[in-house]
Amino acid sequence: MTKELKILAACFAAFAIALKLAYYREGTLTALKTAAALYWLFVIPGYAMMLHWRNRLGLAERMAMGTVAAIALTGIASYYIGLAGLKLQNQTLILPLAIIAASFLAYLKFSARKTQQQQ
C-alpha cells in the first residue's frame, strides 16, 4: 500500500506540473491549490472506493475508474445534500472525507470477512 501511495504522490506532482504548464500565466501556488483541490475531491475518494478490487485490477485502472465513479458520486450526492440544506462550502471538505471513510471501512469489513472465509 505504501508503494501505491508513493505512486499517487508522483501522479499528483505530475498533475500539478501539467496544470502549471497549461496555465503558465498563473502562479505556481494557484496550480498547486487547484491540483490539490481536484485530487481531494475526486482522485483520493475514487482510489478509496476502488480498494476492494485491489487484487483484481491494476493501480492505473483503479485510479481511472475510481476517479470517474467519485466524480459521479460527488455530483449526485452534492446535489441532494444541497437540496437538504448543507451549504456548498461545507461539502468540499465533508463529502470527500465521508466517501473516503465509508469506502475504507467497507474495504476493512470485506477484507476481514474474506480472511475469515479462507480459514
Image: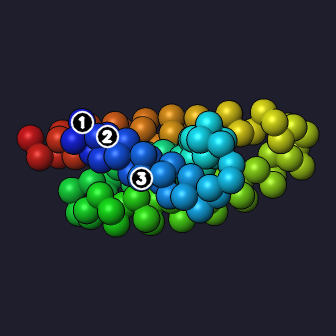
Q: Which residue is mark 3?
A: 14
Say what amino acid the circle numbered 1 marks: Thr
- Residue 108 position within the rendered picture, expressed as x and y whole percent measured from the top left: 34, 37
Tell me: residue 33, above or below residue 59: above
Total label count? 3
Q: Which residue is mark 1?
A: 2
For mark 1, give the secondary structure.
helix
Q: Which mark is residue 111?
A: none
Q: Which residue is mark 2?
A: 5
Category of crowding for the residue at label 1, using alpha-carbon neighbours closer than 10 angstroms: few (below 14), some (14–19), many (at least 20): few
State the separation of the CA atoms marked 1 and 2.
5 Å
Query: What residue appears at the point 51 percent right and 39 percent down from the top-left corner?
Result: 100
Tell which tag, 3 or 1, sits nearer the viewer: 3
Q: Residue furthest front?
A: 25
State the separation of the CA atoms marked 3 and 1.
18 Å
State the separation of the CA atoms marked 3 and 2.
14 Å
Query: With 93 as the anchor, is 47 left or right in this view?
Result: left
Query: What residue appears at the point 48 percent right and 45 percent down from the top-left corner?
Result: 44
For mark 2, give the secondary structure.
helix
- Residue 35 position within the rendered picture, expressed as x and y whole percent measured from the top left: 57, 47
Examine the rendering and report whether any part of residue 49 can be seen. Answer: no
Q: Are marks 3 and 2 in contact (CB under 8 Å)?
A: no
The mark nearer the N terminus, 3 or 1, is: 1
- Residue 18 position within the rendered picture, expressed as x and y whole percent measured from the top left: 50, 58
- Residue 2 position within the rendered picture, expressed as x and y whole percent measured from the top left: 24, 36
Say what amino acid the circle numbered 2 marks: Leu
Query: With 14 as the anchor, is 102 left or right in this view?
Result: right
Query: What residue appears at the point 43 percent right and 65 percent down from the top-left corner?
Result: 64
For mark 3, give the secondary structure.
helix
The mark nearer the N terminus, 3 or 2, is: 2
Q: Are marks 3 and 1 in contact (CB under 8 Å)?
A: no
